[in-house]
Image (cartoon, grey):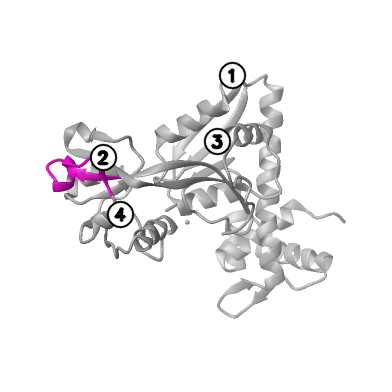
Amino acid sequence: MTLDLHKLEHLVAVAEEGGFTRAAERLHLSQQALSTSIRTLERYVGVQLLDRGHQHVTPTPAGQALIDDARALQAQAHAALERARRIGRGQAGHLRIGHTPAVTAEEVVELLTRARTEERGIQAHVRQLFPDELRDQLLTGACDVGLSRSMPADTGLTRARIAEHRLRVAVPAGHPLAARPTVALADLSGEPLTVWGEPGSSAYTDLLIGLCRQAGVEPDTRRNPVQGTPPLTAVSATGRIAFVTAPPGPAAGGTAHVIDLDPPVHVPVHALWPAHTTCRDRDVFLSRAGEGVSGAGEGQGSSPG
């Protein structure tokens, strides 16, 4: 017997649904058939994969390890089918890119231009996703590569640093700092700072706070009440400052002003993708977009992101 992708799908469904009843409904199977499938898989693996409690079913450590790898295998199988179908139809290369709000659409286009994907016959489809959505889509194979600032490579994902951007400060037009050509991080002491995730729950927020603390500043962070909007929009709407990677000068129709930090500070762009998978178009993009970037190819490790 070889490892059966259908049985792995059954295992993942039971774990995600927390029991056999809902998993069977999701898979359009009888509970008996699903239970038999899982027990057959456990016999093949040789260890118990699920703890069957009275109220809830949870994976054992061995089961969780297999589930993590199963998601990557399912993603690889899905990608292989789609690639074969595209080639059979004579279609161009296809690369599905997700990016967190911390990486702007303009910066994604810049990376695609650097990688010369269009010249290489690769058609890119780009969309913005929050970190949890991006992680799920990468693990299920719905996305080929994700771009973020600080999102970690959880189990089943690989991460590499492929670019960095200069960090700047955006302030409302008319703010006392707006007339200055540059500011230091220390100049931001006492300024309300708009962030998009609560400290401790957003790795990018934690990165920005860490940069401030290195400069001796304890930032007064306030979460943006409108999620998904660009930082410059939040600056003009809230009257608070924000860290951005936009060019210096007037912005947001003149309602905000972007100022260089001195000394300069840079923040990374990380690419994430399903571990143990192959995708020629993704490899082309990563190799070209990340050329000359120190730290590229960190691999698994170390979030919005």
Amino acid residing under circle 1: Glu
Q: Is 84 on the left-hand or right-hand side of 198?
A: right
Which residue in the structure is indicated by mark 3? Answer: 96
Q: Earlier in the sequence, mark 4 or mark 2?
A: 4
Amino acid residing under circle 3: Arg
Residue span colored magenta: 169-183
Q: Is residue 151 visible?
A: yes
Which residue in the structure is indicated by mark 2? Answer: 258
Amino acid residing under circle 2: Val
Location of residue 104 in the rendering, given as x and y in whole percent from the top left corner: 40, 38
Q: CA distance from mark 3 to mark 2?
A: 31 Å
Quadrant containing the N terminus is bottom right
* Label 4 crowd bin: few (<14), some (14–19), many (20+), radius 10 Å: many
Amino acid residing under circle 4: Leu
The mark closer to the camera, 3 or 2, is: 2
Q: CA distance from mark 4 to mark 1?
A: 41 Å
Q: Earlier in the sequence, mark 1 or mark 2?
A: 1
Q: CA distance from mark 4 to mark 2?
A: 14 Å
Q: Earlier in the sequence, mark 4 or mark 1?
A: 1
Location of residue 118 in the rendering, given as x and y in whole percent from the top left corner: 56, 21
Kindly give the residue lying farthest to the right in the view shown: 1
The mark closer to the camera, 3 or 1, is: 1
Residue 185 numbered mark, or none: 4
Kindly give the residue lying farthest to the left in the view shown: 174
Q: CA distance from mark 3 to mark 4?
A: 37 Å
Q: CA distance from mark 1 to mark 2?
A: 34 Å
- Residue in the image at 49% along x and 54% along y: 151
